Image: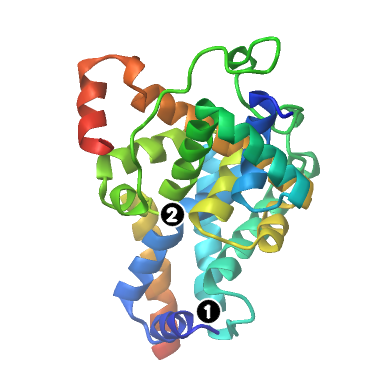
Amino acid sequence: MLSCKDVSERASRWLDREMGFWERLQLRSHLAICVHCRRYLAQFKATVAALRFLPDETPDDALAEAVMGQYRNRIERESG
Amino acid sequence: MSGADEDIAARLRAGDEAAMRALVERHHRAMLGVAQRYARDRDTAREIVQDSWLAVIEGIASFEGRSSLKTWILAIVANKARSRVAQDARTVPIDELEEGSGIDPGRFDAGGHWASPILPWDEITPERLAGDRELLRLVAGALETLPPAQRAAVLLRDVEGLPTAEACNILDVSETNLRVLLHRARTRLRAVLEALLAPSSGSPGKRRLMRTAIC
C-alpha cells in the first residue's frame, strides 16, 4: 500500500504518464480512499498547467535597446 | 522547419524590427533562465543573454530549421554560457538534486500520511488559469524563488514545452537529473501557491484573491 508520502513523490511520474501498470494500480487504490492525495495531485497538475499560460517576461529597456541596436547595425551593414 | 519559424526567420533577415522586438520579448525569460543555470551572478547572466542575441542576429541567415527556432536560440545561450563560466559551474549543485522530492518532511506523520489536511483550491480549469492574470503573476513570482537549475528545468519543460532530450542537452544534465530537478521544482511551486491560495492562509487580501482567482 502506498503512503501519502509515496504518492507525493510519484506526482511527476503520474503527471508525465511514466508509471507502469502495477504502479498505476497501486496509486489508484490509494486515491480511491484518500481525498487529500486526490487534492494534492489535482493541485500539482493545475500548478504545472498554469505554467503554460505565463505571459512573456519583457527584458529591461537597456537590454532590449542594446539588442535592437545590434540588430539595426547588422541590417545596415548588409544593405550598405 | 515549421511555417511560423520560417516566417519569423525570413522577416528577421529582411530587417523587420517589429519581428525582432517580438522575438526578444518572446524568448527573454527562457534565455535568462538558461544563462542563470550556468552563471549564477545576474549581471553575468544578462551579458550572456546579450552576447547570445548578437550571435542570433549574426546567425539567422544560416538558420536552417533543423531544430525549432526556440531550441536553436536556447542552444546558443547554453554554448555562450558554458564558454563563459568555469568547468565546475557546469555541475548542478548537489543541494538542488539531493534525495527527497522537495516536499517539507513535516507535512507527513511517522506513517507517511499527511500530518495536516490538504485543503481544496476549488475547481481550476485551464481556461480559468489562462485568463487569471493575478494568479499567473503569483506563479511567475513563485518561479523566481526556485534555485537556478530547478527553475531552468521547469522553464524548458513546462513553460516552453521542449522535449526532454533537448532540455537535457541545453542544461547539460542527464535525463534522471532533469526528472529530479523538474519534480522538485513543481513540488515547490505547488507549495508556494498553496500558501497563497489555501483557505487557511488567512489574510483578507488572500481571501479576496481566492474568490477572484479560483472560486
Colouring rule applied to residues = rainbow
Q: Quadrant of the N terminus of chain B?
A: bottom right
Query: Which x, y percent locates residue B55?
Result: 56, 68
Label 2 in the same subunit as label 1 = no
Dot 2 corresponds to which residue? A52
Q: Is residue B21 left or right of residue B6?
A: left
Q: Chain of mark 2?
A: A
Q: Residue furthest top?
A: B110
Mark 2 closeness class: few <14, some 14–19, many ≥20 residues within 10 Å:
some
B144 or B41: nearer the eye? B144
Q: Is residue B63 left or right of residue B178?
A: left
Query: What amino acid does circle 1 point to?
Result: Ile
Q: Chain of mark 1?
A: B
Query: What amino acid does circle 2 point to?
Result: Arg
Kindly identify the residue that appears in the image at 37 percent across and 71 percent down: B20
Quarter of the view holding residue B10: bottom left
Q: Check residue B60 in the rendering and tell me which mark sits there, or answer none.
A: 1
Height in image: B196 above or below B140? Answer: above
Kindly identify the residue that appears in the image at 29 percent across and 14 percent down: B202
Residue B149 visible in the shown view: no
Q: Check residue A2 in the rendering and tell me which mark sits there, or answer none.
A: none
B106 or B161: nearer the eye? B106
Q: Secondary structure at mark 1?
A: helix
